[in-house]
Image (cartoon, rainbow, N blue to C red):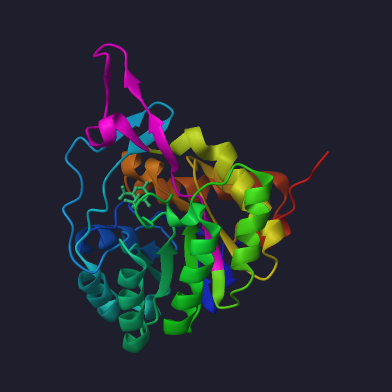
């Protein structure tokens, strides 16, 4: 079977890569992804200056997924820009640079520099980044999002994407799609980021499992699969001129198949990669191939976006 994907002027051997935040904070980790079976690489969301992030424990895996309140630990924008400068693009694995400034100005500063550097990597702006104090994350403030994207497209004229938080209301899907469709330069949306502010409890210890925010953290893994699929399918329908990157709950070829059936062009793995290591890429790709053979599909276009309704 042919797992190749051609999108945004990029050619990928397969549709699978890491979710921002997992196996992508250091050059060593990024190289682990790049030299694995993954079809692309994305960096940890960065801020202009390095950040230590939150006190540990700040990540915990459970049988059904994961919870995290990392607090944006990252090596700082210049570190990732320099990695993007020396990145071997000709080897055929695209590089995406995730940006998550603590303020809009921080995002604009990083994007201005990235535009000037004229690199082949593509930015993925994390809209789960904080908004003004007392306001919800940017991705949940549609007016602020529209204003931010207006300023972003002024400083960065190239193709870019955004990482979206999950939405749970039909009106919110429509409102966010209306904001995003106003920006032709916005070429892809990555759905979804973790489901915010979950709480995992350890019964034996009668305690929370992560230190920050008295135990509240973003949920990933199997917990989020149905929500991720809904967001992929809704934005696939609502953003006809853009690509959707599927992220959330992919543990095997079956979930990767679901995301692509729902409309995803390419897919990312987070919790599964954190727990299993880079071997997850080859395993999931083998499982996806076997499923396609079983179903008589030659290539991803044979089923992408063709989820049936009843
Ligand atoms: C939540 C923020 C810290 C504002 C952004 C970074 C981030 C983190 C993180 O670094 O805590 N974890 C996630 O699951 N998704 C994210 O987008």
* Side of 137 where 216 appears, left or right: left
Residue 150 visible to an observer of this rendering = yes
| Quadrant into which the C terminus falls | top right
Q: In the image shown, does 6 or 108 lie closer to the viewer?
A: 108
Q: Position of residue 36 (x, y in %)?
A: 35, 58
Residue drawn at 64 percent across, 43 percent down = 169
Q: Is residue 69 above or below residue 19?
A: above
Residue occupying the far front of the picture:
134
Residue drawn at 80 percent across, 42 percent down = 309
Q: In the image shown, does 33 or 271 lie closer to the viewer?
A: 271
186 is within the stretch colored magenta: no
Q: Is residue 208 above or below residue 212?
A: above
Which of the 4 image quarters holds residue 132?
bottom left
Tell me the magenta residue range.
Answer: 188-217
Residue 233 visible to an observer of this rendering = no
* Side of 146 where 103 appears, left or right: left
Circle count: 0
| Quadrant into which the N terminus falls | bottom right
Q: Position of residue 269 (x, y in %)?
A: 43, 49
Q: Position of residue 196 (x, y in %)?
A: 43, 41
Q: Position of residue 19 (x, y in %)?
A: 40, 54
212 is within the stretch colored magenta: yes
Residue occupying the far right of the picture:
310
Which of the 4 image quarters holds residue 122?
bottom left
Residue drawn at 27 percent across, 27 percent down = 209
């Amino acid at each position: 079977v042919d797992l190749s994907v051609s999108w945004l002027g990029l050619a990928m051997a397969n549709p699978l890569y890491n979710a921002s935040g997992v196996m992508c904070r250091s050059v060593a980790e990024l190289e682990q992804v790049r030299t694995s079976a993954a079809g692309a690489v994305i960096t940890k969301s960065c801020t202009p200056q390095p950040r230590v992030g939150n006190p540990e424990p700040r990540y915990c895996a459970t049988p059904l997924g994961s919870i995290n309140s990392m607090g944006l630990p990252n090596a700082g924008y210049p570190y990732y820009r320099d990695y993007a400068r020396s990145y071997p693009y000709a080897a055929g694995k695209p590089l995406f640079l995730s940006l998550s400034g603590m303020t809009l100005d921080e995002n604009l500063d990083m994007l201005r520099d990235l535009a000037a550097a004229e690199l082949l990597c593509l930015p993925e702006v994390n809209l789960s980044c904080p908004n003004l104090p007392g306001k919800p994350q940017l991705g949940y403030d549609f007016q602020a999002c529209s204003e931010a994207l207006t300023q972003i497209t002024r400083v960065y004229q190239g193709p870019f994407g955004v990482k979206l938080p999950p939405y749970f209301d039909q009106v919110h899907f429509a409102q966010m799609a209306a904001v995003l469709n106003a920006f032709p330069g916005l070429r892809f949306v990555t759905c979804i980021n973790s489901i915010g502010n979950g709480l995992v409890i350890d019964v034996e210890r009668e305690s929370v499992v992560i230190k920050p925010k008295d135990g509240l953290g973003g949920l990933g893994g199997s917990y989020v699969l149905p929500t991720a699929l809904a967001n992929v399918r809704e934005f696939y329908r609502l953003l006809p001129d853009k690509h959707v990157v599927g992220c959330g709950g992919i543990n095997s070829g079956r979930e990767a198949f679901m995301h692509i059936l729902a409309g995803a062009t390419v897919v990312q793995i987070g919790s599964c990669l954190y727990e299993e290591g880079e071997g997850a890429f080859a395993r999931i790709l083998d499982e996806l191939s076997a499923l396609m053979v079983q179903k008589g599909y030659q290539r991803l276009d044979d089923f992408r976006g063709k989820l049936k309704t009843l």
